[in-house]
Image (spheres, rainbow, N blue to C red):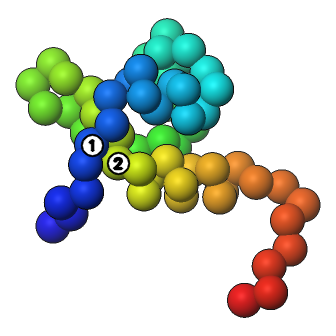
Amino acid sequence: MSTEPLLTPKQTSRILGVTTDTLAVWRCRKRYALTFIKVGRKVMYRSSDIDRFLKRRTKGETTDE
């Protein structure tokens, strides 16, 4: 069970450089696999899920792992 703080759509949109409306479209249309959490009507995001999303979307990066 994760205890990391949850981010609001507004905070997430700032990190990703998109609008909150864009995040809503992504959720509704399942445009991208960005995991989110529903608590009642509230939508929240884990920073680790955002990091994972960005890593999957990164192209042309080589790693030395």
Instruction: Give the distance between the C-alpha atoms of the residues marked 1 and 2, in whole angstroms.
Output: 5 Å
Q: Is residue 5 left or right of residue 25?
A: left
Label 2 sits on residue? 46
| Label ID, residue 37 | none
Q: Residue at x 80, y 87 (%)?
A: 64
Residue 9 visible, this angle: yes
Q: Is residue 54 left or right of residue 60?
A: left
* Residue 51 x/y as whole percent: 53, 55
Query: Secondary structure beneath disc 2?
Result: strand
Residue at the top extreme, as displayed: 21
Q: Residue at x 65, y 57 (%)?
A: 56
Residue flagged by tag 1: what amino acid is it?
Answer: Leu
Q: Would you identify the image quadrant in which residue 65 lies?
A: bottom right
Q: Residue at x 32, y 28 (%)?
A: 8
Q: Is residue 23 left or right of residue 63?
A: left
Determine crowd level at label 2: few under 14, some 14-19, many 20+ residues with C-alpha closer than 10 A: many
Q: Would you identify the image quadrant in which residue 44 lies?
A: top left
Q: Name the foreground residue: 59 vs 3.
A: 3
